[in-house]
Amino acid sequence: MKEVIGVDIGGTHIRLGNPEKPESIVRFRTSERDAVAAIAGYCTSRGVTAMGVGVPGLLDKDCRKAVKVPNIPALNGRELASELEAATGASVFLENDTVVLLTGDIDRMNLADRGVVLGIYIGTGLGSGLFINNKPYKGKYGYGTELGHVPLFGVDEACGCGGRGCAETVVAGGALVRLRDRSYPGTDISELFTVLTDADRSRYIEALSVVLAGTLNLLDPDVIILGGGVAQMRGFPLEEVRRGILGHAVKPYPAEGLTILTVPKEEAIPAGVYGAWKYALGQIAVVSD
C-alpha cells in the first residue's frame, strides 16, 4: 500500500504525517537533529513511498536543491531532495513552504477559480506565495514572491538572507521574540499581543500594514489569505491591520475590493502538512500522466 506524507520544515518545528491519518502526524523541534535524519527516522517502517516537503527558503528552479534557507542555515546549499530520497527510498517533491501552504489553503477554502490569490504567512519568518489561475507564479530563477525580504526604508536589522532591513525583521516571529526579550521579559510569546504598549502595538500594525498594502497595490490580487502562527496568536490585531492596509491602498481600487481571508486554525492537521501532502499528490498525478 502506498503511503504519501506531507512534511513541513519550519524555522522552529518540523511537522510531518499523513492528513488522512491524523494520529500519524508528529512534530519535533527543528534544532533537535538534522532534518534529513529526523524525517528518515519517521519514515522507517512506515512504508512511505512519496512525500511533499515544504522548505522555508529559496530552492533551485528544479526544486531539488535548498539554495538559501535563512532561518535554518544548516540546509543552505544542500541537495535536499536527493538526500531525502537516498535516506528514505521515497519519491521527494520539494517546494517553497508558502507554495505548499497556499496549495492546501486554496484546496480547503475552495479558491481554485478565484484568479489571482496571494498567500501571506507570518511565522518565524514572513512567507508569501502567489497563484495565478491556480498555478504558482515562478520567476526567472524559479522563485516566487519573497515578501519577507522586501527591504523597508529606515530599517537596518540584519536578516538571515544576508541582506539588511528586510520586512520579516520587523513583523515576523523572530522580530516579536526580540521585542519580547527586550521589553517584555518573562512573557509567553503566544500572549505578546495582549500585553503590548499602545506605542509598540501601533508600530507593529503600521509596519505590517505598509508591507501588505504595498503588495496589494503591486499585484491587485482577487484574494489575500493571511495565515501563519503569528496571525493566529491571541490578540493579533487583524482588524487594525485591515484598516491600516486600506489607509495605504490605492483608491478606489484595489482598496474597495479588498478581500482578506484568514486561515482557520486546525490543531489535528497542521496547514503545512496538509499543503505538502496535497502538493505531493498533485505531483504524483502529473508524473502518472
Image (cartoon, rainbow, N blue to C red):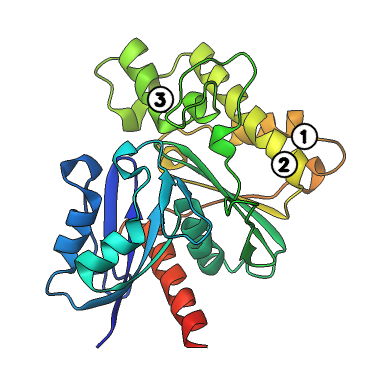
Which residue shows up at 19% across the image and 78% down it?
Answer: 47
Instruction: Check disc 1 and give the amino acid type.
Output: Ala
- Disc with the residue nearer the chain's start (2 vs 3): 3
Query: Quarter of the image containing the N terminus?
Result: bottom left
Relative depth, front residue between 83 and 2: 83
Whether the residues at callouts 2 and 3 have beta carbons within 8 Å, the answer is no
Residue corresponding to mark 1:
249
Within-10-Å neighbours for mark 1: few <14, some 14–19, many 20+: many
Q: Position of residue 266 (x, y in %)?
A: 37, 57
State yes or no: discs 2 and 1 in contact (Cβ < 8 Å). yes
Work out whether mark 2 precedes mark 1 in sequence or the reverse, and give the earlier one. 2
Residue 244 seen in the current view: yes
Residue shown at 86%/36% (left/top)?
251
N-term mark: 3 or 1: 3
User: As drawn, is 154 to the left or to the right of 25?
Assistant: right
Residue 56 at least partly seen: no
Residue 84 image label: none
